[in-house]
Amino acid sequence: MRAIRVHEFGGPDVLRVDEIQIPSPGPGEILVRVLAAGVGPWDVGLRRGAWNGGLPYVPGGEFAGLVEGDTGADAGFDDGAPVYGYPGLTGCYAQYVSCPAEQLAPIPAGLAVTDAAGAPIDSLTAHQGLTDVLAAGPGDQILITAGAGGLGHFAVQIARALGATVIATASPRHHEFVHKLGAAVVIDHTRPDWPDKVRDSMGGGAQKILACAAPALDGAARAARDGAAIATPVHADLPDAERVSWLPYDGEPSGSRLIRMAPWFDDGTLSVHVSARYYWQDAARAHRKVEEGHTRGKLILVVDDDLSRAWEV
């Protein structure tokens, strides 16, 4: 099969198309023919040197595709069943990937396959942070920073689905988009005083916060009231820890959590905003776009040739 691999750390140009063996699924794993893969900042970070495994490696942590042969039989998946998942932070920029059965799920009927490829990591991370970490629910006011990004745009929608009122931050060009996602108030986080604006709009400060991006960590702490809970999957120094309660966590792969979110995808409560699709062998272009920052929603690599022709990528 063909796969994109990183042989040495560096810029986007280190991404290289290679011919390699199709992976052999181990016990409890399913072989999937990849139709599309999501692109995220984790891909860029690993490519630059954060990957601590061996070289070369295949980037890509999320996919949408079709079950290959009888490899999914033990888990109840027929040959050709459409699935999406999060097998780990690598392996998905390829024509085939092997994924543990408990880390994938059927693609919801309301979700297009290319869009599904951009859902697993960020939707799972947002749902976990809002439910397991912050216990968000009706009557809560939730501050979500970077509400237009990959993680943030899922978080805004999920918080609303859970019954919370959402105050989000975003740059001005994304305000209308974030309002349409469900935010009651959107604050301009390009202004140095944005934490003060949040405190004004939330009656003295936020009590529950999902901090979705490293540049906003300091502002999130400043926007919080004393004793506030701030959940974040961002790995960075956490400021003002004496006054607020930081709750760092890592988004976990979970097919069952994807299944729990499926009704929201089906009825339109939850959607994936895809800002751009790229032919997968142009992954370097997608990485450059991620490095520019301020991406609205998700970027997708279309792996299947028929799909790439249909999307004209």
Image: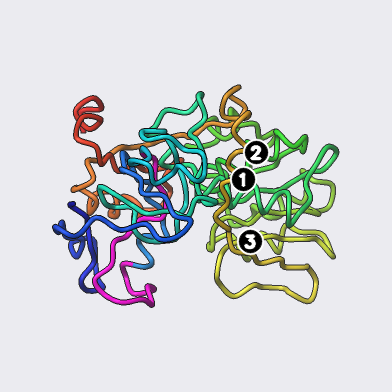
Q: Residue at x 46, y 41 (%)?
A: 297
Task: Find numbered disc 1 in the image and state the secondary structure of the residue it sits on.
Answer: helix
The kind of residue on which mark 1 rests is Ser
Q: Which mark is residue 38?
A: none
In the image, residue 51 lies at what x, y percent? Answer: 37, 73
In the image, residue 5 lies at what x, y percent? Answer: 23, 62
Magenta stretch: helix, strand or loop mostly: loop
Q: Which mark is residue 256?
A: 1
Is 264 a magenta residue?
no
Nearest the viewer among 166 and 262 is: 262
Q: Which mark is residue 232?
A: 3
Q: Residue at x 66, y 35 (%)?
A: 183
Task: Find numbered disc 2 in the image and state the secondary structure of the residue it sits on.
Answer: helix
| CA gap, disc 2 and disc 3 | 22 Å
The kind of residue on which mark 2 rests is Arg
In the image, residue 28 lies at what x, y percent? Answer: 48, 56
Mark 2–mark 1 CB contact (< 8 Å):
yes
Task: Find numbered disc 3 in the image and state the secondary structure of the residue it sits on.
Answer: strand
In this figure, which residue is indicated by the disc labeled 2? 260
Residue 267 vs 150, above or below: the answer is: above
Q: Earlier in the sequence, mark 2 or mark 3?
A: 3
Characterize the local packing of mark 1: few (<14), some (14-19) or many (20 or more) Cα atoms within 10 angstroms: few
Residue 141 is left or right of residue 284, and the answer is right
